[in-house]
Amino acid sequence: LHDNMKLKVNSACAPSERLDFFKPSVPFAVLKERYHFEKRVIDLIEVPEPVLCFFCKYHHLQDLPIAGNLGPADIQRVIHEVKQLQSFFTASSRYMVKHSKYSGQPVTKSSDLMDAFILSGSVDLRQKEVLEREIGEAQQALEAIAVGYRELEQQDVALRQEDNRLRKEKNELLKVKDNRKKLEANIESRQTKLTTLRGSSFDLKVLEEQCEEAVSKVQEKRVLCFNELVAKVHVCLEAAHNRIKAGLSAASVEVLHSYLADRYQRKKREWDNAEQEYERAKEKENSVKTVTQNKLTLAKSKSNGVENPMKDDRLSRIFSTLPEDLGEIDDKIHEYHTMAELCFGDEGVLKEYEEREKQIERLQEEVKEEEGSVDRDKQSIDGLKQSWLEPLRKLVDEKVSAKFGEFFRQMNCAGEVRLKENENFGKYGVEILVKFRSSEELQALSAHRQSGGERSVSTMLYLMALQEITKCPFRAVDEINQGMDPANERRIFDLIVQTASQPNTSQYFLLTPKLLQNLNYSPAVRVHIVANGQEMVKYSEWNMDSFLI
């Protein structure tokens, strides 16, 4: 238009926003109900949506209401009450309102509306029919051109197929030509070499000696390598033997500890039972002594406190009344023995008490010996425990936990790995503590505190922290990015790429159904896309050259 037809045409770019983005500052329903406005300027214009969006963005048509006949009082009420409205129309005037930034008072400017003089011309029906007929003819010509274009497209497809076939034949002929040139060059070099050999004279014995010398040197190198391999195998075997021996020693110590602990508990129960028996015997002894003392006191009271009854006249008279027959005296003696036994108790009880005391002393000595043996075993176990516990603590704190915390700091989070110790070796473990938000404290990793994505991130970083102490040729990670948000997935991928790209590290296989866009790949990363399905091309028909063409 500007260069060829020399026309000056104003143009503008349509805004990127849609029409529903431009909302009126005052809802039209409120203006219609309270202030009797009838339409908006935007409702009276029929243009394409991009043009309407342009007018709304730069001329604010959505905020231009129109009223029929408003009285002066109604106009003043609109000006003072609706402060968001900067312009509006009545039947004959346009009002523009501005509010002072200092006093807030409105400043109003009104102007009369002019008569319409743009886009008001009439339509020439005859010219319209001529134009419509020309348009129909142009459409028919366009359809004929479209038919010809489709035919040309079909011819173009056929020509492209023929071109591809000829290109394949050309490539095959070029390959045949290259193979022929290689064969000709090879034949020529062989002929030259043959000619050289025929023209030169050489000593077979010298060549044979040189070959034998080279073979002997190779054999010597093989022997040295074999000896070195044998020495390293012996070192490995010795290390494995020491490891097995240490494991067996630890197992035997643990078995001995369990045996001694059981034996100690059994002896302790026997000691408790013996103490209970001793207490019962002592109580029985005290009760017997009490009864005996009571009987002795009763006897003294009966004899009026006389130590030698034969010197007492009254007792002499009592003894004179006793029978002189030996049988009767024996009966009396038996009677008095019975009475004495009733007074002084059973001798078997005292003997049992003495035996129990000896048994208690013997058990106390055995308990002391067992306690000494247990203390020695405990010292031996503590020594063995320290021999592997300190290196384990150092490994977890200085290597695993440090690397784990470093990975988390790169993600603006915090993490720590601790060794969970216990008196029972079977309850030893590793505790992982993580913090993904600054307002939280370090918390143990579990299914109840962290989300699935956070657990995936923590697990992947823990495996990466272990790679320096666990040597293996490769590591396979299956769908570790499932459940992660895009930010964490991108950070984890960057860490994996950074770690796997370092020298002397294990090879990573990351299996995933998806990858984010614009990830950072190093030269050591390879992406393999596995395509499968019913609509896939068969492997026998796969031809990369034809696909690229």
Image: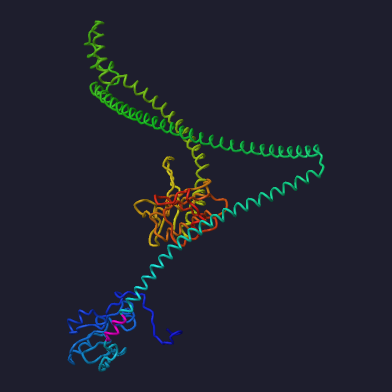
Residue plotted at (51% across, 34% down): 249
| Residue 440, x across and y down, in percent | 38, 59
Residue plotted at (50% across, 58% down): 164
Residue 34 appears left or right of 480: left
| Residue 107, x across and y down, in percent | 28, 92
Q: Quadrant of residue 332?
A: top left
- Whether 379 is drawn above or below 84: the answer is above
Q: Was residue 215 drawn as part of the magenta stretch in this picture?
A: no
By secondary structure, the bulk of the magenta-drawn segment is best described as: helix
| Residue 472, x across and y down, in percent | 52, 45
The quadrant the N terminus occupies is bottom left
Residue 456 appears left or right of 88: right
- Whether 329 is drawn above or below 517: the answer is above
- Whether 285 is drawn above or below 324: the answer is below
Q: Please name whichever residue, 3 or 320, is drawn nearer the observer in this view of the structure.
A: 3
Q: Please name whichever residue, 217 or 245, is drawn nearer the observer in this view of the structure.
A: 217
Q: Which residues are magenta?
A: 123-131
Q: How many labels were placed on the picture?
A: 0
| Residue 116, x across and y down, in percent | 26, 91
- Whether 263 is drawn above or below 145: the answer is above
